[in-house]
Image (tube, coloured by chain):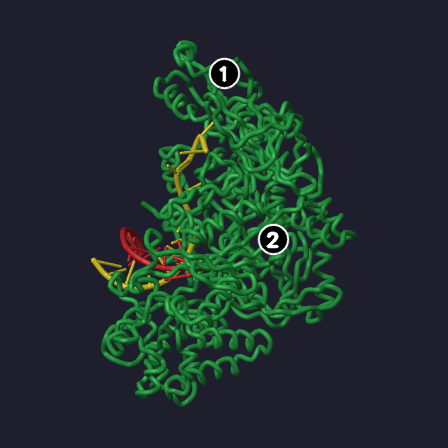
Chain colours: A green, B red, C yellow
Amino acid sequence: MLMQLLDADYFLNANKPVVRLYGKTENGNSVCAFYDKFLPYFYVRPNSKTAEAVKNIREIVSSEEIEKFTPSGYQAEPAKLLKLTITNPQDVPRISAMLLDQKAVDDIFENDILFKYRFMVDHSLRGMEWVDVKGQKTFTKTVTCPAYGASSISAVNKKENAGLRYMAFDIECIPSDITKPLNSKKDPIVIIAMSFTPRYKNHDTLVLVAKPASGQGTQGFQNEKAMLEEFLKIISAYDPDIITGYNINSFDLPYLLERLGQNKLPKFFGRCNDKPVFTKTFGISQETVIHGRVVVDPYQIIKRDPWVKFYRYNLNTIAKALLGEEKLDVEYSEMPDLWKGSREDLNRFVEYARKDAAISLRLVIERRMLDKFFEISKISGLLMQDVFGGQTMRIEVMLLHEFRKRRFVMPSKTSRTTVSRREKEKDKLGLKGATVLEPKKGLHTEGCTLVLDFKSLYPNLMRAYNISPDSLLTGGSFKCNIAPNGAKFIDKEIHEGIFPLVLTQLLESRESIKKLMKTARGEEKRILNARQLALKDISNSIYGYTGYVRARLYMIDVAGAITAYGRENLEKTKKTIEEKFPVEVVYGDTDSLLLKTSLTNLDEAKELGEKISKAVSSELGNLQLEFQKIYRTFLILTKKRYAGWKFTFDGEWKDEIEMKGIETIRRDWCPLVSQTMKEILDIILKEGDMQKAIATMRNVLEKLKRNEIPLEMLTVIKGITKSPENYEGMLPHIELAKKLAERNPHDKPRIGDRLGFVIIKGNQILSKRAEDPGYVKKHNLQIDSDYYIHSQLFPPIERILVSIGVTKGELLGSGHQSSIMDIMNGTKRRTKHEINIDFSKEDDKKALDDWENFVCQKCSKSYRRMPLQGSCACGGELLIAYQGSVSNRMVRKG
DNA sequence: TGCGAGCGGGG
DNA sequence: GTGTACGCTCGCA
């Protein structure tokens, strides 16, 4: 039997593990294979006490001498290790802790590989790949699908995907006390909406209601319990592979589990009957495991995508942006009334829920949200349930496959103490990051600016210089490459490192897929594209992994060698280009160079860009510098903050204003700021008319002073998430909510309401001066124009205007000295309301940026973002340093 | 400037 | 589940 591998787990039978592989046959049927001939094991580096200790631990059923390479530095000979086999996977942590405590081993390896992955790696099985199962049909009640007792299990090469069944669902709940947030222990689910692809019994959607109701695709029930029972029945009957819904991981699924418990209903709706569905909580994010199915949360996928950023991530914003579709308009605070109201009210509530479920499913299906993750699963070997996490697990499971093939062992997960030691060391010694060339600041309008960048720079550097944990030389004299940071890597003729080897496979595979894509069409082309994106993601993440303190293969010298070669390469290339071509390098960052030309003709500029690309690439040999695009005009404020009027050629020229590190939309900016900023940038870049830009700004300031800006343009909207007394600090919209409640005790703002506010003049602190725009209009109150000028408009726009040499005098120019003088004098006062531009949202586009921070060369002060002046407060030059972690906590100096 | 609390999405 | 993990922004000292 052939099946595509969807999920895996194991259960214990007489204290021995039985692996279960859940899959889909070619016909799209669900099946499960059982395999009981595989036991957990791990490796130790033995010492004089080992033999005795092993003898005394009865759980160890066998001990085998074995030769394996360890990946910390180049080793000519394998190490002599012991492979210890036990029976119950759950005993492994205890037994390895015991061996370590007794100092009965010198080292331990692979003692924390999840059992399902231990099995999969040893059988060369990867998630979403095909598996050949030889064996007999077996009768069991532990799984809900046909089961096979397998005598052998092996990987099969097959490209097609089996058809999958998708179900999205969305629950609606009513709080019993509308002044308090929802409480899953008390507040019932009243509606469950579902959406299916393919259809379920001729239904695209189905809505269950916990009170009598009727209608097309609507089913009423006596109470919550009866409705939940039907929901479980539908899941069982439809048997979805993918369960999805917006934010289901941290809302709908945990809430549903709690309600099932409260109603004394079973929590079994996966494909096995012996393990309930459960939610794991870590920090803030939650994840629900439904054995044998895949939980997909489009919210988490969209939010974590480094390539696409939205300013909000609620379903309405996302659906509008990705589907051109909006939610039905129902406020949380209306829901209790709709639930208790007329038939029409209830119907509106039902249709609201139905649409949410339908939109969530459309996001996943129409936006092909899973294509890339299916490929990541196949490439890394992770099961679908785990591909939505971070890069670390992907890399480690992928490497585990490669390690096994090449007789290497994987170090164990980094202990807490080692993590903090690495953090301290890194903090002290630092890790130099990439070069960011000093920008030729200001506006470049005369000639075109060419943008060129190195293709897969870090992966290719690793290949070119054989940079890898297992090729790093720690002693001995061998033929080697010496990196600019002093690290030595053995010549690849003697030993090719595992990282370069894996990267070569990934990059070559990507190149051949890109070739296939040229002639492919439709579905086939889409899958190829998803695969090349997945390959790119994984190859780009390997460098970051080597400097991530929690990585099993953390090697600071390896990470340092990569960036050192990168810096050397960028400087060299800059020199070469400036010597050979009539261009000036105006900026460059890590792997990119921006070259200013004297050419005003796009076609000529393109020709020059391609010529430079060819010349540099052929000189460098193993690295390719590609011509990307043209900025007809280019404005750079500081390192990492710039905007350009971009032109790309794809049969014809296309143009667009492109911004990096400059944001025009932020949640805490009123629409006036976004609009003015866009207008000014457009004028500067497309018209190059400074006077017009200044006049535009001045015009807005004056209108503000004269109260001529419509209130909508000044309104910031924020939602109330809990009752006012539960807010600790002072927030404008909460203060406003209190005021509104006092004014109108019969219609207080409720949890879930969204309040728009403007800031009015007065002597109280800012938050107390938040006011309802309608109230302001009615009572003809004065808005606080100083606030809007100082705290909203001026900070971002002043940075742009000043960078292009607009002097303060010029802004003062016309006859409004006194008022605008106030603004200028206010620059020092501004710190209080200063709004930092956050470029991380835009500039996260490169995965690499997640790993960077900025360290002063002179005083070693570190910054998470490039300061606005482009240098340290002490005046020293800032180097991009390597953060090597996703948490900003670790960046901070002690 | 540094720290700690609180929020996001969902109802 | 051979677990144990966010990242950013704001107010306040």
Identify the residue shown where x is 59% and y is 23%: A407
Residue A420 visible somewhere in the drawing: yes
- The residue carrying mark 1 is A82
The circle on residue A200 is: 2
**What is the chain identity of the residue bearing mark 1?**
A
From the image, which quarter does the C terminus of chain A lie in?
top left
Q: Nearer the viewer, residue A857 or A300?
A: A300
**What is the chain identity of the residue bearing mark 2?**
A
Where is residue A195 shown, x and y percent of the image?
56, 57
Identify the residue shown where x is 79% and y is 52%: A519
A384 to the left or right of A521 = left
Q: What separation in Å lies between label 2 and label 1 (alpha carbons)? A: 54 Å
Question: Which amino acid, by three-letter code, is at mark 1?
Answer: Leu
Pick whichever of labels 2 and 1 is earlier in the sequence. 1
Residue A564 visible somewhere in the drawing: no
Query: How many other residues sit within 10 Å of disc 2, few (<14), some (14-19) or many (≥20)?
Result: some
A65 to the left or right of A522 = left
Where is residue A106 shown, x and y percent of the image?
42, 19
From the image, which quarter does the N terminus of chain A lie in?
top right
Do the residues under discs 2 and 1 have CB atoms within 8 angstroms?
no
Residue A741, compared with residue A203, is above or below; it is: below
In front: label 2 or label 1: 2
Question: Which amino acid, by three-letter code, is at mark 2?
Answer: Tyr
Q: Nearer the viewer, residue A320 or A424?
A: A320
Where is residue A445 shown, x and y percent of the image?
60, 72
Residue A755, compared with residue A263, is above or below; it is: below
